[in-house]
Image (cartoon, grey):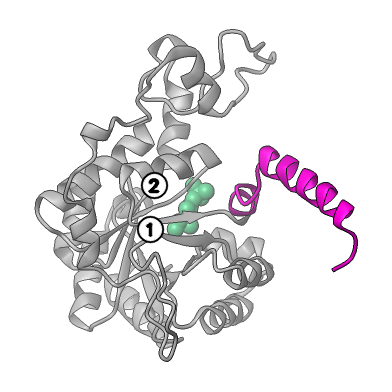
Amino acid sequence: MLQPSEIHPGIGTRRGAMEPTHQPVKGKSLKHPAPLAPKIFADTAKIEEIRTLRDGGIITGVTTNPTLLKAAGAHDWDSAHQIMRDIVKLMAPHPVSLEITELDPVKMVEQGKRLAGFGPNVVVKVATGGYQAVDKALDPFTGLHVIHELWKADIRTNATLIFNCTQALWAANAGATYVSPFLGRLADYMYKNDTPERAPGNSLFFMEDHKAPAGGPERVGNTPYVALHGPRMDAGVRLINEIVTVFCNYNIHTEVLAASLRNAVQLSECLVAGADIITVPAAILMGVADHTLTSEGMTSFVKDTQVFGHQ
Ligand code: E4P
C-alpha cells in the first residue's frame, strides 16, 4: 500500500478543475455530497450490466473495446454499432469510450468523427502506440497524431494501452481528455516474469504457504500477501500514482483513468493512489457492493426487528 506521504498534496485541487463527477441537479436543495469523487466507470459493453450499475448510482461512465463488444454479442459492424449506440443513449450525458479500429491515420480521424456522431457523450478511444508492431510501415506516432487531430476538432479522446508515465505525458500534450494506464496487464506481466523471490513489483503472488498446482503458481489476491509479508510495491498501482503525481506537479487536467483491473484490492488501491477515474468489470463492481460483515449485521438487525411486530 502506498504511504500517505507518497500521495501528492495537490490531488484535491487538481480535481477541482475537472468536470465534476456529479453535476448539480436543478431544483434540488439537498446538494450531492461527493461532486468531486473519483469517477467509477463500467468496463463492459453488456447493456443489462450497465443499466443495473447506472440505476444504482454506482457508475458515471462506460468504457468499451472490440473484445468487450464481442463478449456483448456483436458479430458484425452493424451489431457492434447498434450496441455502441444503445450504450451511448442509455448513459447520456455520461461519457462512453468507443474505440477506433482503423490503422490509417486519415481513416482513424474519420472513424473517430463518425463515432463521436453517436452522441455528445462519446469519448473516442485511441491506442497510444503499438502501430509498428502491427505494421512496420506505420508511423509509431500515429495514435498521438490522431489524438491531436481529434482535439483540434473538439472531440474528446481516451488514450489507451498506456504502460508508462511518458506515454501518458505525450498523450496529454497531444490533447487527450483521458489517459488509460492498464494496471492489470502490467501486473499480469510482472506475475509471469517475476520470481516469487523478487516479489516487489508484482501484485499477484502465490504465497509461500500456498501449494502451487503442477502447472504453475495459482493467482491469489494480494491482500493476504501484504498481511504476511508487509508492504509491497504493486507495479500497476505505482504506475497510476506516478502519472497522477506528474499530472499534479504540472497541473495537467487530462484525467487518469485506471484500466484493466483484475480484483477488488486493485480498485481500493487505485483510489488511494489518486486515480481520477477507475473503469471496472461489472463482476468486481457488484462484488464490492457487499461484505460478509455487512450481511451479518443486516441479518441480525432484521432478526431483532421481528420482536417489534408489524408497523
Ligand atoms: C479499458 O478501457 C479497457 O477496456 C480494459 O480495461 C482492458 O482491460 P483488459 O486487460 O482486461 O483487457
Q: Secondary structure at mark 2?
A: helix
Q: Residue furthest front?
A: 308
Instruction: In this rendered view, identify the residue nearer to me: 15 or 159.
Output: 15
243 over 44 or under it: above or below: above
Give, as a three-letter code, the residue at label 1.
Pro
Is residue 208 on the magenta stretch?
no
SS label for mark 1: loop
Residue farthest to the left, as pictured:
250
Which residue is disc 2 drawn over? 271
Give the magenta-colored segment's residue range: 283-311
Point 63% across, 12% down: residue: 210
Residue 237 percent across, percent down from the top left: 36, 38
Residue 273 visible in rendering? yes
Residue under numbered circle 1: 38
Q: Position of residue 252 (x, y in %)?
A: 15, 59
- Identify which residue is drawn at 22% across, 65% down: 16
**Sooner in the amino-acid sequence: mark 1 or mark 2:** 1
Quadrant showing the C terminus: bottom right
| Horizontal side of residue 176 vs 110, given as left or right | left
Q: Is residue 297 magenta?
A: yes
Determine the main secondary structure of the stretch shown in magenta: helix
Crowd tier of the residue under label 2, counting other residues whose Cα lies within 10 Å: few below 14, some 14–19, many 20 or above:
some
* Residue 292 percent location from the top left of the image: 70, 38
Which residue sits at x=67%, y=38%?
293
